[in-house]
Image (tube, coloured by chain):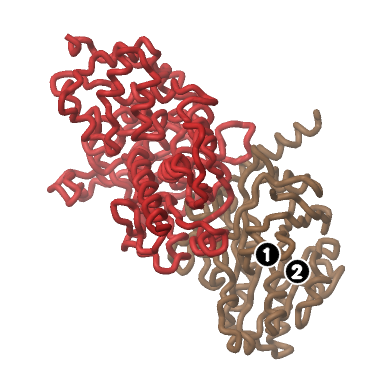
Amino acid sequence: MANKIPRVPVREQDPAVRATNFEEVCYGYDKEEAMLEASRCLNCKKPRCVEACPVNIRIPDFISRLVAGDVESAAAIIAEDSSLPSVCGRVCPQETQCEGACILGIKGEPVAIGKLERFVGDSKPGGSGTVPNGIVRNGHKVAVIGSGPSGLACASDLAKMGYEVKIFEALHEAGGVLVYGIPEFRLPKKAVVGREIDEVRRLGVEIETDVIAGRTVTVDSLMDDEGYEAVFIGSGAGLPRFMGIDGENLNGVFSANEFLTRANLMRAYDEHYDTPIYAGRKAVIVGGGNVAMDAVRTAKRLGAEAVIVYRRSEKELPARAEEVHHAKEEGIEFRMLTNPVRILGDENGRVRGIECVEMELGEPDESGRRSPIEKEGSNFEIECDVVIMALGTSPNPLIASATDGLETTRRGCIVADEYGATSREGVFAGGDAVTGAATVILAMGAGRKAAAAIDGYIRAKER
Amino acid sequence: MFTIKEKRLLTDNICLMRVEAPRVAAAAQPGQFVIVRADETGERIPLTIADYDRSAGTVTIVTQTIGVSTRKICALNEGDSLADLAGPLGRPSEFVNMPSDELRKRRYLFVAGGVGTAPVYPQVRWLHEHGVEADVIIGAKTASLLIYTDEMHAVASNLYIATDDGSAGVKGLVTDVIRELIDVRGNRYDECVAIGPMIMMKFVALTTEPYGLKTTVSLNALMVDGTGMCGACRVSVGGKTLFTCIDGPEFDGHKVDFDEAMRRQAMFRDEERKANEKSHECNCFK
């Protein structure tokens, strides 16, 4: 019986070694391992995994090709629904999506769908391959703002349909959160992100960096002066949140965004790069999401003793299970049910500690999670010289404030229907800019839906 | 892209570069800044726009060599390119959006210190072109460190110079000149704009406060992206935390917590010192 085979373990860098370097933690499957793991799939008639995938990748179909060793067909099946398999195989929260729905998971371990997807993505031949040659240009121009997951997905779909697409990126390197947010040890920049972006370029998509939409150009200038018939806004959720507690402006307090951007985009951990960074002797990271895990593991790699402080219990940690597991293996300390009250400074205005209060869980709140309540009088101090706030992000208001008639929510998210259409004709939006901080796969899915909607919009206008 | 069309040394350690950046030149307004990266391994650093020429498609930046990154920028020559020049960032100066009849009734006092004189120039020029009176005080340690005096002379209503050693203009501080203009000459101003070292802006704000003279300062906080993403540039203004990059860079000088701002500017001083020493070593063996 196929399901008697235990889940094939994936090879990883030794925790003690990897906690001192920035190389990728997980080595992934080789072909033999992938074929063995693929053979565990029951090929369910009603595949629950497909339903649980935000972009409904035909999972049993691609896995069955893998069983036969036909990686190319497997890649073609994934490509119908996803343009970033190497990325999503690494960063999707599979345990709450495809793998969480896998029948095998009820009694044992689910099929390692994420690792299989990653194997297929990584096996894609560079240079030529799945890119359809002979795209017929249709003469219509579309602008895409932001080169993160939603923008890349939207641009590549439109390019395949024959549109002339240009992506405008605010930073100096394309990739959005894949480049500035997610660390090298989880998502290699050259080998994985760079390759996916090259793929998008090979479809004919042009990427112009150093263009800040809302400042350098506006949605209106792109449409009126540069002749773009439609604009897709995939500008992400880049604005960091702080707690609003005392001491947050002390030297040594960083947003996770700043800390990670220094390390990832600016490569501050590499001595050949000029951007400074410091993680101190002991760094306290506030938060429990993937960004908090990325920040704490980066601090550890920079030589600090690194601690997570989270106000709920371990069960409520919003981070991917694999990241929490990896962090623990690397020696990260987790202080659950703990909430900062204020940050303490020395006479020079540098962080010397953080005062916290113990929490207990009360009734479930609107998110369904039990809400944490302070235990009165339980205040205590943790000595540290760096504090990193990883409390989530909200959309950057720059574009919305520079675009007349573009409706936003109270929280600054752009209002868009399920196809990405906004309150402005010809202007579409998707990803975190619309939903607030979410996942790579959802952003990618939104980009692809918007590409289809933009195609429909331009065709209808032509008629 | 970002080719250096012209380079001039204004003093021993301040260089002016006119850089090809048509998109930035087309959108730039007085008061805004750009993020510059010299090369692939360089830091992103914010520089206030010193001038822009829409028809030539160029932006002028003025850089003082204070560390590894600014030295890298100033080491480039005409014909070389910067890796990146992104902008314009930040909000334009408030007067840009004022109704012109109201604006023409106003009288401005600009206080420029050191390399901060460069970003004062496009503001004064803009006001001059819009028929608005603006007096300018330029302060420097000594005469050889003065920049932009000829350019400023052409657009300022009155130009005053103050040096610490008296080698040019009056001997003394810019704050002495402010008091003299208001107390002795009886000048009246509607707004003072101060751009220069943080410590100068702090004392200008302290000087103008008793007169009730609205004072705008342009902060040069540490930044990474310059678009609101990192929060490195946060500053306390009237007790509220704001981001210099998207809420500024110009703020009400009477509300800025300068001591905190100066402390935050020195956040990476140890790392910068190490990098400086390292880069000096490297050059010796090249």
Quick one: which residue is furthest to the front in this view? Answer: A463
User: Between residues B200 and A81, which one lies in front from this camera angle?
Assistant: A81
The residue labelled by disc 2 is B139
User: Between residues A332 and B26, which one lies in front from this camera angle?
Assistant: B26
The amino acid type found where label 2 is placed reads Gly
Vertical order, B41 against A328 (above or below):
below
Whole-percent x and y of residue A344?
41, 49
Chain for colour red: A
Q: What residue is drawn where x is 83% and y is 56%?
A: B8
Tag shown at residue B196? 1
Q: What residue is drawn where x is 56% and y is 44%?
A: A206
- Secondary element under disc 1, as helix, strand or loop, is loop
Whole-percent x and y of residue B250?
57, 67
Query: Is B177 positioned to the left or the right of A453 in the image?
Result: right
Q: Mark 1: few, some, or many residues within 10 Å (few <14, many ≥20)? A: many
Pointer 2 with pointer 1, Cβ within 8 A: yes
Q: What residue is drawn where x is 20% and y is 47%?
A: A372
Say whether residue A448 is visible.
yes
The amino acid type found where label 1 is placed reads Gly
Q: Earlier in the sequence, mark 2 or mark 1?
A: 2
- Chain ID of residue with mark 2: B
Vertical order, B140 against A230 (above or below):
below
Quadrant in which the C terminus of chain B is drawn: top right
User: Between residues A430 and B96, which one lies in front from this camera angle?
Assistant: A430
Q: Colour of chain B?
A: brown
Whole-angstrom CA distance, mark 2 to mark 1, is 9 Å
Tag shown at residue B26? none
Q: Mark 2: few, some, or many residues within 10 Å (few <14, many ≥20)? A: many
